[in-house]
Amino acid sequence: MKSPAEEAAAPPSGGCSELGASSCAAGREAAELRGPLPLPSLADAAAEGSGDAVQLKVPVLQQLYHWDCGLACSRMALRYLDLLNDEDFQRAVRDLQLTKSIWTIDLAYLMRHFGVKHLFCTQTLGVDKGYKNQSFYRKHFDTEENRVNQLFAQAKACKVLVEKRTVTIRDIQEHLSQGHIAIVLVNAVLLLCDLCSSPVKYCCFLPIGQKCFCRSPDYQGHFIVLCGYNRALECIYYNNPAYADRTCSTSIHNFEEARTSYGTDEDILFIYQNS
């Protein structure tokens, strides 16, 4: 599963570089200060059942650039867990050698670095070669393929929890019902908020004042943070890092269409509150 859902990822560090042993060790050291992480499972989240409606108070933090939605979502998650320190976050970005091409596996390593209990579910353990000709992935594909594949290969040794599996909407609701959250890769072209007065396609994820560079309307990867649902209304609540002042809502049907779109690998990073 990959997700350069944002052409990128961090102010520091120039080019795409592999995760070295030192970076992996740095993540382990930071996490081990908080103790070992038990292997999470979706069954854990389902233990107490789920309510009819949940809306978690996840802080809304806006992305700074057109490419850093994944980093913004990670900051929201860490703030929700009361683990966010801006200086530590920037140091982690440097330690993990993140660049301007952020994939979901990068976010999983970032959670591990902070000792956050997590589970990354995807349909593709590595890079789908079919994306090479897709406009969204084409620019960085050749340089990123080896880097991302290596991250997947090293995940187990670095205690980054990854599973190739299908996730259902019920799995997601049960997870949220326990107070946990999730970062999801979606196709922004398809995702439509029911609460925003004038939904804007394609470039609605650019902060105010930034020029649109989109050229293709078929796929635009974007990360969001899931923070609730309402069974009666059949909707999902989420924080969109494009905005700093709102929690968005979309129908379950639209959410499923956006998160299972070709290009997303159905990537979802489950994040657990008891980290």
Image (cartoon, rainbow, N blue to C red):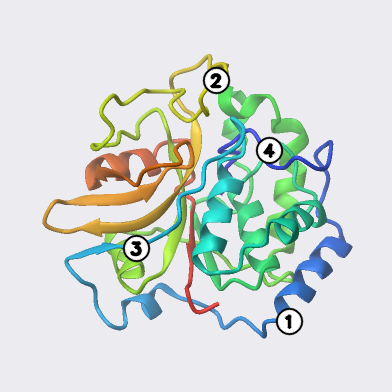
Residue for point 30% across, 51% down: 237
**Which of the image's four quarters has the C terminus?**
bottom right
As drawn, the residue found furthest toward the left would be 232
Residue type pointed to by label 1: Leu
Mark 2: which amino acid? Gly
Query: Any mark on residue 101, and which?
Result: 4
Residue that carries the numbered disc 3 in the rendered image: 56
The local secondary structure at tag 1 comes to loop
Pick whichever, 226 or 131, lies toward us. Answer: 226
Helix, strand or loop at mark 4: loop
Mark closest to the chain's N terminus, 1 or 4: 1
Of tags 2 and 3, which is closer to the observer? 2
Mark pair 2, 4: CA separation: 22 Å
Q: Name the residue that disc number 2 marks.
A: 209
State the image coordinates of residue 37 (x, y, percent, origin top left): 61, 81
Find numbered disc 2 in the image and state the secondary structure of the residue it sits on.
loop
Residue 73's spot in the image, x, y percent? 53, 50
**Residue 9 versus residue 108: which sits nearer the camera?**
9
Instruction: Confirm whether residue 134 shows in the render.
Output: no
Residues under labels 1 and 3: Cα distance? 27 Å
Label placed on residue 33: 1
Quote the CA–CA distance across marks 1 and 4. Answer: 29 Å
2 or 4: mark nearer the eye: 2
Question: Between disc 2 and disc 4, whose residue precedes?
Answer: 4
What's the distance in space between the residues labelled 2 and 3, CA to CA?
Answer: 30 Å
Name the mark nearer the viewer: 1 or 2.
Answer: 2
Label 1 Cα neighbours within 10 Å, binned few <14 / some 14-19 / many ≥20? few
Residues under numbered marks 4 and 3 in contact, where contact means CB atoms less than 8 Å apart? no
Who comes first in sequence, dot 1 or dot 2?
Answer: 1
Q: Where is residue 35 in the image (x, y as percent from the top left)?
A: 67, 85
Instruction: Tell me the kind of residue under disc 4.
Output: Ser
